[in-house]
Image: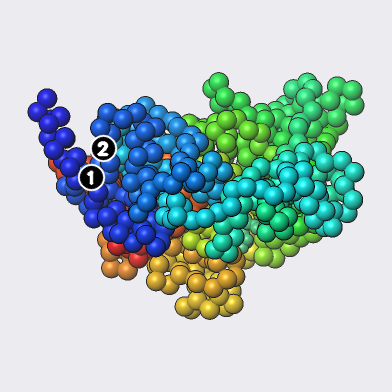
Amino acid sequence: MKKKKQNKMSKKVVIPAVLALSVSFGGLLPTTSAFAEEQTNVPTVLFQANGLSKQEVVKAFLQSQVAGPKTLSASGDQFKIVNEEADPATGTYHVRTVEQYNGIPIYGSGQTVALDANNNVYASFGKVTQRLARTIIPTKASISKDDSIAIAKEGIEEKIGKVKNYDAIDGELTIYNYQGQDYLTYLVKASTAAPAPGYFHYFVDATNGNVIDSFNAIHEADPVPTTPVIARGLDVNGIMQSFGVIKDTNTGKSLLHGTAVNGTNSVSVNTYDAHRMGENGFIILSGLLGFTGWEVETKTNFFADPAAVSAHTNSIKVNNYYQNIHKRNSLDAKGMPLISTVHIGSKWNNAAWNGKQMLYGDGDGVYFSSLAGGMDVAGHEMTHGVITNSANLTYQDESGAINESLADIFGCLAQMNARGLSSPADWEIGEEIYTPNIPGDGGLRSLSDPRSKSVSAAYGLRDNRYPDHYQDRYLGELDKGGVHINSSINNKAAYLISEGGEHHGVNVTGITRSKTEKIYYRALTKYLTASSGFIDMRNAAIQAARDLYPDKNGQPSAETKTVISAYDAVGVTGQ
Ligand code: TI1
Ligand code: ZN
Ligand code: CA
């Protein structure tokens, strides 16, 4: 009873300094994350429930972050709840919202709000648009949805030629902010198989039919089921692997279609061959439409393509990692199939996630050998799949660097997990496939010491090395704003959290891999949003650490302190 009273008193500190500051700028700028004071003492209550329902609390809290006139009848309710989940482990409740204007969703918007057991808001991430109620965005379309579809078709067919048959095409009214201006658009999404596979997105101005922006995304195809058999094959590293596949009983051929089984969850795992189709074409075609390449087949139950065997078995291992360590059922947490295609392009020195599946190049044999041979590469690409289905971090600038970094972090952790706890730590990424003619030179990037790796002089970085401090970050336009460069700053923070060490004069006490992965997974799936940058990553990791390892007597736990000092060490400091 007494405790309860104290809690009530403490709730008076509704808006801590950090939040108050961001709100005071809020009339002009979008606010960034609202985040409870991390250091000590101040209770982590950003907003009191006051008997409201969870949904009401979330909306009232988000509205409270909007400075000035909150609502205007023309703009309507600004926030729409799109996902809610309880976390039984911590008794907390997590809500995702998107913003809308007059009921029309705003493309790319989103917030996460976390409620404690009393329904009080204790954390929130994601920009809140400040002047929506005062912004005049047209909400009346003067062209029809069908007109917008016709306009999108025209654009698509200019690019890939006459499309006889669209697999799917539809439009939806969406507010799209492009180069600082809000447009009422129809977002037309179109899937094509021929003459080229594609998943096109067209933003057609609903007031005048202009195409504001367009791009291509991706989808997957269905497997063909038959009789299960056990097959084998050598992987890229010369190791014999054994795995279940299906045999087409009519032709007697086995296909590289299997299942990753973990307890009651089972996920389809299908691996295909692009026969060296060009990477650009493949990425576009496969994205939405579902072109996955050609079947990998054998008549003997022995699969003779090492790249296919590696991609296939690595994807099972990475899935096992996410299922066993994070209780995640495949990349979308809903059991989606794991699709990989190997032999993309001619000597393509890369691997990718196209929104739907994994793609692996063969490498040129000098810079990289077959990229399917890197288990951490598979972990990296599959983590992009997890990100697509959680925070959906925008692949550009800071949010892109956080996206790339989480791909590297979980790539490393999944690989270490597969090797077993007793195996030595490995914080190099891509060591199995990088510069095959120079043995022992590690990987493409290093999480333990980013500066041990050189980077192209085109970036103009100090000593042409990957940065390990926020002040050394790359601010140019190459690599989508340095997504593979600045990722190193966050990579180093994750390494320090796990292993500890002194960095730029800050001492960090390591808390183990196992605690590190729990913190980052929680930050990714419960707190980060599409627009999160470095400071949000810091705040999300601290919040996740505090959830998992709570403060005691107003003092952060050792784990939380480690997270704070790791981010201090890489120059990402609480303001
Ligand atoms: S997600 C993918 C980006 C690809 C864009 C091209 C379409 C990516 O980040 N690929 C990894 C592959 C990798 C991963 C290689 C781990 C080695 C180790 C990557 O880092 N690519 C580098 C080469 C890059 O694209 O700059
Ligand atoms: Zn990547
Ligand atoms: Ca590695």
Residue 496 location, quadrant: bottom left
Question: Looking at the picture, how far across and down is residue 523, in whole percent?
Answer: 41, 45
Residue lying farthest left?
Answer: 2
In the image, what residue occupies the spot 82% across and 41% down?
Answer: 166
Residue 121 location, quadrant: top left
Residue 543 horizontal side relative to residue 292, left or right:
left
Specify whether tag 1 is near ligand 2 (CB below 8 Å).
no
Q: Residues within 10 Å of mark 1 (few under 14, many from 20)?
A: many
Q: What amino acid is labelled 2 in the image?
A: Gln
In the image, what residue occupies the spot 59% across and 60% down?
Answer: 178
Residue beneath label 2, please?
48
Q: Nearer the viewer, residue 520 or 554?
A: 554
In the image, what residue occupies the spot 55% across and 21% down?
Answer: 264
Answer above or below: position of 137 versus 122.
below
Residue 333 location, quadrant: top right
Residue beneath label 1, please?
14
Disc number at residue 219? none
First along the sequence among labels 2 and 1: 1
User: SS for tag 1?
Assistant: loop
Circles 2 and 1: CB atoms closer than 8 Å: yes
Question: Looking at the picture, how far across and down is residue 433, in whole percent?
Answer: 64, 56
Quadrant holding the C terminus: bottom left
Q: What amino acid is labelled 1 in the image?
A: Val
Q: How many angstroms separate mark 2 from mark 1 (CA)?
A: 7 Å
